[in-house]
Amino acid sequence: MAEGEEAPEERDVVVVGLVCDPGLPAEMAERLANRLPGELSLAFDGAVEWRVDTRLAPLPLDEHGDIPLASTARRFRRREGWDLLVALTDLPRRVGTRPLLASIDTGARAGLVSVPAAGWPFSFRRVRETIVHLVARLSGGSGGGRAVRPRRRLRPVPPPSSARRFSSPDPESMDESLELVGTRGKLRLLTGMVRANRPWRLLPSLSSAIAAAVATSSFGVFYNSIWQMADTLHPARLALVNAFAVVAMAAWLIAYNGLWERPDGARLRRAVVLYNASTVCTVGLGVLCMYVLLFTVTLAEALVVIDSSFMESVVGHPAGLKEYVLIAWMASSMGTVAGALGSTFESESAVRAAAYSERERERRERFEEERGEHEEAEQAEPGGQGS
């Protein structure tokens, strides 16, 4: 270094660990790992150098249906050497009747973000803003492990404007939760739950139903009586037939696969209503995606097979693209109803993707298994109960 030049200021390095559930949280974590260091440096005026690590690990649920954030944070921070931990889950969390977007445990130097509460669209931006806020709060708190004490004071970062902050009643505590309020917040949670389920990914598990629907819709393309019916019916009536076909198939899939939940008690009634609503929307959108695919195939088939002059002789007036669309519309509705009869999801993963209750049950079982393994390990140690 040349004489007279000042040595560059050494900055603190803070490592933030992202522990994420499979699915949408994992996809978000991959994008966040590249963007968060820059976002955090910008938010804190470069006072700290940030590093972000990600780990894929389904977050278990305890017997109360809560994610044990403190124990999860201690385990990962000790093993990975992280300063702070933020967990991303695809499960909806609630405080009473209010959807929970995020919470902080300063003692464990950890935060939890419920991705469904970020809604749809703009979910990635909301999750990113929430994580920046949590990191700012955790950097100023106290807790076990290496303290994060930058040489310059970090300026406060406000929470996302869509969430309301509720602090702990203990004045000495920095713990807080970010919650959504009102009907708008509940609707945002519902749309986020449907987004996290990714209903378009149900299509591969409906391949047999799609095959049956394509075969039936082809029947409508080849028989001119269907052409006459499609040409005669008012578009409103065709739309009603379309809606009936989609609803009938969605209802069959929900009933046949046992996706409709019933409350075990008054405490669970609101949660069951939310889960059933998300299941109906998820399966309904999945069937609607199937219908769009079926309509596209049927329209292409009609354009190739049906000669326009022959169609004119059948319907009794000049035929154009509108008539082809009406035929494909009618035939696709027929095919959807036929595909619904006896159809089911072809994999258990599709059932889990459509129903939050299935995933919660799996995570409770995983928590019990992990707790049993931990107790066995403690008893096996020298001086343990089993010695």
Image (cartoon, helix red, strand yellow):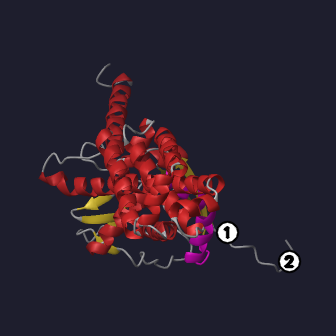
Residue wearing tag 2? 3
The answer to which image quadrant residue 187 occupies is bottom left
Residue wearing tag 1? 10
Residue extending farthest to the left is 266
Specify the segment rendered in magenta. Answer: 22-47
- Residue 266 image offset from top left, x and y in percent: 12, 53
Residue 112 visible to the viewer: no
Element type at mark 1: loop
Callout 1, which amino acid? Glu
Callout 2, which amino acid? Glu
Q: Classify residue 302 as left or right of residue 166.
A: right
Q: Classify residue 376 as left or right of residue 325.
A: left
Residue at 51 percent across and 77 percent down: it is 153
Q: Residues within 10 Å of mark 2 (few under 14, many from 20)?
A: few
- Residue 175 image offset from top left, x and y in percent: 33, 65
Which one is nearer the viewer's eye here, 198 or 233?
233
- From this view, report whether residue 238 is shown above or below residue 2: above
Element type at mark 2: loop
- Residue 361 image offset from top left, x and y in percent: 31, 40
